[in-house]
Image (cartoon, rainbow, N blue to C red):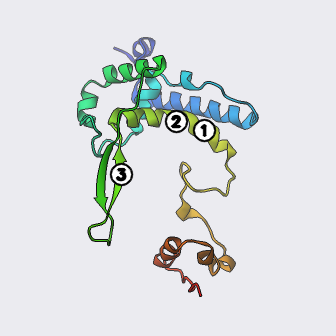
Amino acid sequence: MDRTMGLLEGQMTGTLGREIISTRQEKLAELARIEPKRVLTTLAHHIDEVWLREAYRRTRKDGAVGIDGVTAAQYEAELEANLASLLERFKSGRYRAPAVRRVHIPKPGKAKKTRPIGIPTLEDKVLQRAVLMVLEPIYEQDFLDGSYGFRPGRSAHQVYVPTSFRGYLPRTCSKAMAAAWTRAGHHAPSHA
C-alpha cells in the first residue's frame, strides 16, 4: 500500500503522525497566546487515534507494570485495537483509571525506611500522556520565561543564580534544599 492510500484509510506513518501532532499543538499554543482570557471549555476532541498513537510512542516502555500486569510488549502486540478501545472508552466517558499499584521502595541512606510510590497501568500512562500533550501547549503560554520547574525542555538545574544571591539562597530554603545546594558544590552557611 502506498503512503497516500494509507493516509486515506487513516493509517499514519510515524513521522507524519508526529508532524500532525506538532502542528496541532502549535495551533493550540497560538490560540492560548493570542487569546489568553479565552476559556477553553472542551479539549477532548483533540485526542484521536493519531494523538493516542503518538502518546504511546512518547510513553516510557521500560517501567514497572501496573496492577493489570500488562507489559509494553503485550500492549503493543495488539496496539491498534488497544488504542481504538481506549479512545472509544475515553470519548464515551466510560474510561475509569484503574487502581494504581502501590510499591514501597527503600529510602536511600536510611535502613529499614521505605517510601511508597504508585505505578499506573501502561494504558493509563498513555492516556495521561495524551492529555498532557493537549494541555501543555496551552498552559505553557502562562509561564514567564524565567520559570523552569516542570516545563518541557527545561529543568530547575538550568536556573542561573547570580553570585550576589548565592550566599543567601540556602537560608531561605529547607534543610533538604540547603543539603542539595551543598552537594552541588556551593557553600551553605550555618543557620545560627
Foreground disc of the pair 3, 2: 3
Q: CA distance from mark 2 to mark 1?
A: 7 Å
Which residue carries the number 2 mark? 133
Of residues 141 and 69, the one drawn nearer to the viewer in this rendering: 69
Mark 3 near mark 1, Cβ–Cβ under 8 Å? Answer: no
Residue 98, by quadrant, is top left
Q: CA distance from mark 3 to mark 2?
A: 24 Å
Q: Position of residue 104 (x, y in %)?
A: 30, 55
Which residue carries the number 1 mark? 137
- Within 10 Å of disc 3 (Cα), the crowding (few <14, some 14-19, many 20+) is few
Type of the residue with mark 3 = Ile
Of residues 35 and 169, the one drawn nearer to the viewer in this rendering: 169
Classify the position of the C terminus by image quarter: bottom right
Q: Position of residue 131 (x, y in %)?
A: 50, 33
Type of the residue with mark 1 = Pro
Q: Position of residue 14 (x, y in %)?
A: 40, 30
Helix, strand or loop under label 3: strand
Type of the residue with mark 2 = Met
Helix, strand or loop under label 2: helix
Mark 2 near mark 1, Cβ–Cβ under 8 Å? Answer: yes
Q: Residue at x 52, y 27 (%)?
A: 20
- Within 10 Å of disc 2 (Cα), the crowding (few <14, some 14-19, many 20+) is many
Which residue carries the number 3 mark? 117
Q: Position of residue 15 (x, y in %)?
A: 44, 31
Q: Earlier in the sequence, mark 3 or mark 2?
A: 3
Q: Earlier in the sequence, mark 3 or mark 1?
A: 3
Q: CA distance from mark 3 to mark 1?
A: 28 Å
Q: Residue at x 26, y 34 (%)?
A: 68
Of residues 93 and 52, the one drawn nearer to the viewer in this rendering: 93
